[in-house]
Image: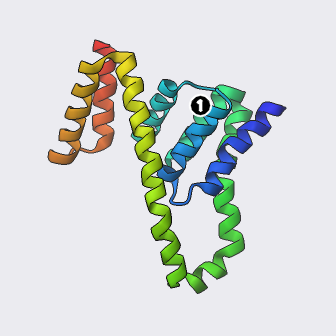
Amino acid sequence: MLVYWQLFLAFFIPGILGYGGGPASIPLIENEVVGRYSWMSVQEFSEVLAVANSLPGPIATKMAGYIGYEVGGVLGASIGIFASVAPSLIILMALLSLLNKYKDSPKVKRITLFVRPVIAILLGYMAWRFFFESYEGIGLLHTILLSVVSYLLIERVKINPAFVILGAFVYGGFLL
C-alpha cells in the first residue's frame, strides 16, 4: 500500500511544481524516481524518457504509466497516470475563471520570465547527467557519435526527433 502512495506523490508533486508542462516536470520526476525512491537508475530513466519522447502524447503521462507499471503493476500505472494529470485537472477546474481574468496581467508575465530560466537550468543539468551516464555506459566514441549525428539530423536536416530516437534505438540494439 505504501508503494502506491509513493507512486502518487512521485508524480503528483512534479505535476504541481512542474510549471511549463511535461518537459519542465521531467527533472522533477527524475529526482523522485531515481533520487528519492531509487526505482530506476539514471540510465534506465533516460531510456524510459527516450521511449516516452518517441511516442505521441504527453511525455510525463507516458512516463508515469510505464514507471507506475514497473513499480506497482496495472494499479501502479493507473495511480501514476492519475497523479500526473490530477494537478492540472484540479487547477483547471478551480482556477479557470481567474486564469481568464488575469491572463494578461504584467505580474503573471513577470513570474513566467523568472520561472523559465530555472526550468532551462534543470533540463540542462539533467542532460549533463545523461551525457555522463551514457559516456560511462557505452563509451566516449559512441556517445559523441550519437550526439553529433542526432544534432545534425534534427537541427540541420530537420528530421523529426522521433525518427532520430528510433534510429538511435536501432544503432544501440545492433551495435551496442
Residue at the spot 55% in from the left edge and 60% down from the top edge: 19
| Nearest the eye: 163 or 113 | 113
Q: Is residue 165 visible?
A: yes
Instruction: Please determine whether, in this image, residue 146 is positioned above or below residue 92.
Output: above
> Looking at the rendering, which quadrant does residue 153 occupy?
top left
> Looking at the rendering, which quadrant does residue 28 occupy?
top right
Element assignment for label 1 = helix
Q: Position of residue 88 (x, y in %)?
A: 63, 60
Amino acid at pointer 1: Val
Residue at the spot 84% in from the left edge and 32% down from the top edge: 1
Q: Position of residue 46 (x, y in %)?
A: 46, 31
Q: 10 Å neighbourhood of mark 1: few (<14), some, or many (≥20)?
A: some
Q: Which residue is mark 1?
A: 34
| Nearest the eye: 124 or 16 | 124
Instruction: Please determine whether, in this image, residue 75 is positioned above or below residue 22.
Output: above
Q: Is residue 55 visible?
A: no
Instruction: Please determine whether, in this image, residue 105 is positioned above or below residue 83.
Output: below
Q: Position of residue 50 (x, y in %)?
A: 42, 34
Residue at the spot 65% in from the left edge and 56% down from the top edge: 16
Residue at the spot 71% in from the left edge and 63% down from the top edge: 90
Residue at far right of view? 1
Task: Tell whether 94 sits left or right of 174.
Answer: right
